[in-house]
Amino acid sequence: MTTLIKNGTLVTADAEYIADILVEDGKIQAIGQDLGASADQVIDAQGKYVLPGGVDQHVHFSFEFNGAKVRGFESSKAAAAGGTTTVIEFVNQIRGKGLVDSVEDYRKANADGVAAVDYSFHAVMTDPRPEVIEEIPDLAKAGYPVMKLFMAYKGMFFHADDDAILKSLLKAKEAGVTVMVHAENADAIDVLQRQLIAEGKTEPYYHAVSRPPIVEAEATRRAIYLAQLADAPLYIAHVTCREAVEEIAAAHSKGQPVLGETCSHYLVLDESNLAKPDFEGAKYVCSPALRTPDHLEALWQAINQGWLNAVSSDHCGFDWKVQKHMGVDDFRNIPNGAPGLQNRLEVLWTYGVEKGKISRQKLVDVFAATPAKNNGLFPRKGSLTVGADADIVVFDPSWRGVFTVDDMLHDVDYCSYEGMEKIGRVEQVLLRGKQVVKDAVYVGENGDGQLLQCEPYGLLYQQ
Ligand code: URP
Ligand code: ZN
Ligand code: ZN
C-alpha cells in the first residue's frame, strides 16, 4: 500500500517547505517536489500543513485516585483523532513485584491489542526496596528508559521520599535511565490542606490554595540538588509556574542536565476555572494546580528558551458526574487529573501559533520531535524524514470553531477546553502509513497501535 501526500507545506522542528511525501510499507519512502509517483492513495494537502504525528510522553490510562480509575487504553483513539500517534503512559509498580514485571504484566493485560496508537511506558517506582533500586538498569534493557517518582501525594502508595529519589538517580545514571519527578512538597501540601478543611474551605478552588507555586518550586529545587549530588540527569514533569521554571533555568545555565515539560492546560487555563460554580471547578482539579494568568506567560517564554522542551497532555480520564463528585464535600477527595489527549495540537496551534506565542517549528518541536528525543524514539518518531515511521498529520489551518465534548473520543463526560475558540483542525492522520483519521473523522480501530522499544538517555543527547 502506497500513499502520496501532495502539495502540502511540511513543517518540522527546524524547517518549513512545500513538498510531497511518498509513504510505503508504513515508512516515509521519499520527500520531494512533484514526486509524481503513482500511489494507491493520494491525499491532496494543498493549503494545509503536514506535520509529524505527535508524541505525548505523559498520559494516564491506569491512574487511580482513592479508588477511582481513569479510562483505559480503549480511549487512546482520542490521541489519534487529535494528531498524536505515540503515547507513553505511567504504570505504577505493584507492591512486591519488580518494575519491569509490573509494566509487562500491565501491558499484556491492558495495552496490547487495544492501543489505538503506538505506545510505551514509564515505570513509577512505588516500592523502593534495595532489590528494586538494583533493578533500574533492567528498565533500559526492556525499552522503558524513563521512570517517574512522585514527590507529591503524601499518604498514597505511590508517594516517594528523598531517599528513594536519590538512590534512583544514582542507579539510573549507570544505565542511561532518565528519572522524571512530580515535584511538589507533599508535607507542605498536607499541612495547608488540613488547615483549609478545618476552616471549612472545602470547595475545588482550595485545591489551588493548598498547593501554591512555592510548594512546586521547593520540590523542583530539591530534586535538582539531589540530581546534582548524584551527578545524574533529571526531568521535571508538568511544570506549571514561573518559580519552578527559574529553578530549571538556573540549573540549565550551570550546565546541569535538567529539563522539564509543561502541559497544554497549564498554558491556557488559569485557576479561575477552579472557582466555577456548582462544582464545575472540580473538572479542573489536577496537580500541580492551575495558576494565575501571569504564570501562563512565563511558561510560553520557558518553551521558547528551551527550558521546557515538551508539551504533554497529562491526560487523565476521570468523569465529572461520578468520579469528580467523590470530593463534593472535601476537595482533597476529588480525583486529580483532567482530560486533554485529543486537544494538545489544536490547543498549541490556536493559543500558541495563532496568538504569536510560538512558531510553527516550535510547535512541532514540543509536540512531536523533542518528546520523541526525550524518550529515545527520534527520528523514528517525531520527524518527517525518509525512513521514519509514516506518522503524519495533515492540518487545516482555515477551520474555525470551538472545543466541545461532543467531538471528543476520550470517553469522559467533559472537555477541559469546552466552548473555547479553536482555530484549525486535524484533518488526516496516518499511523505507520495506515489512515486513522480521514476528513476529520476517526476511522482507525483499537489494536492499531504497536509497542515501541525506547532507547536509553534521550535526555542527554540534547545537552
Ligand atoms: O493531576 C494529575 N496530574 N493527575 C495525574 C497524576 C500525575 O500527577 O501526573
Ligand atoms: Zn504527576
Ligand atoms: Zn500525570
Image (tube, rainbow, N blue to C red):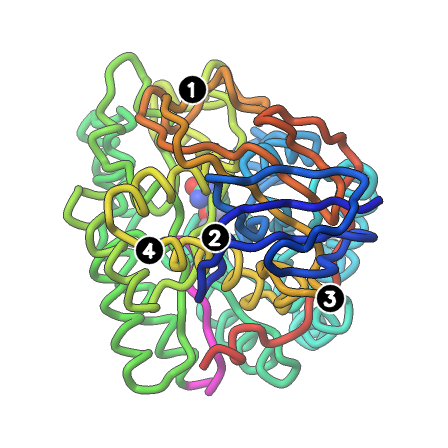
Q: Which of marks 2 and 1 is nearer the N terminus?
A: 2
Task: State how far apart marks 4 and 2 are (Cα).
Answer: 12 Å
Give the CA separation, mark 4 to mark 3.
Answer: 32 Å
Q: Nearer the viewer, mark 4 or mark 3?
A: 4
Vertical order, 370 against 391 (above or below): below
- Nearest to the observer: residue 41 or residue 54: 41
* CA distance separating discs 3 and 1: 36 Å
| Mark 4 sits near ligand 3, with its Cβ under 8 Å away | no
Q: What element carries label 2?
A: helix
Badge 2: how crowded within 10 Å, few (<14), some, or many (20+)? many
Task: Please name the residue that numbered disc 4 is placed on.
Answer: 359
Give residue 74's quadrant in the image: top right
Query: Would you say the residues marked 2 and 1 are in contact, meaning their CB atoms lie under 8 Å apart?
Result: no
Sequence-wise, the earlier of marks 3 and 1 is: 3
Q: What residue type is labelled 3?
A: Gly
Disc 2 residue type (three-letter): Phe
Q: Residue sitting at 62 percent across and 58 percent down? A: 122
Task: Give the residue number, with chain letter if any, for mark 3.
Answer: 143
Q: Is mark 4 on a helix, strand or loop?
A: loop
| Alpha carbons under labels 3 and 2: distance apart | 21 Å
Quickly name the residue at label 1.
Answer: 404
N-terminal of the two: label 4 or label 3? 3
The verdict on residue 82 being magenta is no
Residue 125 in view here: no
